Image: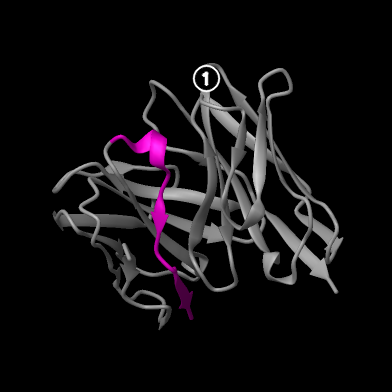
Amino acid sequence: AQSVTQLGSHVSVSEGALVLLRCNYSSSVPPYLFWYVQYPNQGLQLLLKYTSAATLVKGINGFEAEFKKSETSFHLTKPSAHMSDAAEYFCAVTLSGGSYIPTFGRGTSLIVHP
Amino acid sequence: DVKVTQSSRYLVKRTGEKVFLECVQDMDHENMFWYRQDPGLGLRLIYFSYDVKMKEKGDIPEGYSVSREKKERFSLILESASTNQTSMYLCASSRRDRALYGYTFGSGTRLTVV
């Protein structure tokens, strides 16, 4: 079985500040991990993915995430927030050797203040 | 640009109506999925399909059915719409080697049942 927990339904930062969105997963086998972003009234867009290659994954729009097996975490970061980063962010996990249907977290809304 | 297109952005239907939500993808993807998204609950899988004319139940199939007569089209059917089916509905597709590439999502259909 697999599950994913996103800590904090809302995260608020000032423009230019560090963005940190937390994701912890539960998996009995090596996972594949994803971050998606959803802008208002739009579908989800893939930001980045971890598929057992490098543990530090770089995505679009300056975001990156680090896979830490010992902490079962895949936190999303960006050094400097921009107003355009305000959106809903979803972490997702799927398992190698399984049905490959991902389990999504409940989402974290990122609010960026001027 | 590759796309998943959902036929309607907004729909308002009456209780008891039969409702069709259409989704078309132009990427020749084998797999297609229907999710509903509700605040605080994230994305929940309704149905998915790995091939033409096949379908599998997801986590919340009750009150829904699907149809996949052609590879590019995946329809979600609400047999008798109810107010608790008011939600955002998201269609997604992926390649057969589904774990490695993530999903491509449509822009969503916001359905209101009155």
Q: Which residues are magenta?
A: B97-114
Q: Is residue A71 left or right of residue A16?
A: left
Residue at mark 1: A30
* A111 drawn magenta: no
Tag 1 secondary structure: loop
Q: Position of residue B47 (x, y in %)?
A: 34, 48
Q: Nearer the viewer, residue B32 or B110?
A: B32
Whether residue A55 is visible, yes or no, is: yes
Q: Residue at x 47, y 73 (%)?
A: B110
Image mark count: 1
Does residue B61 show up?
Answer: no
| Rendered view: A98 above or below A57 | above
**Residue A92 left/right relative to B45:** right
Residue B102, compared with residue B10, is above or below; it is: above
Residue at screen point 20% across, 56% down: B67
- Residue B71: image location, x then y, percent: 16, 54
Q: Nearer the viewer, residue A62 or B48?
A: A62
Q: Tell me: B96 left or right of A41.
A: left
Q: Chain of mark 1?
A: A
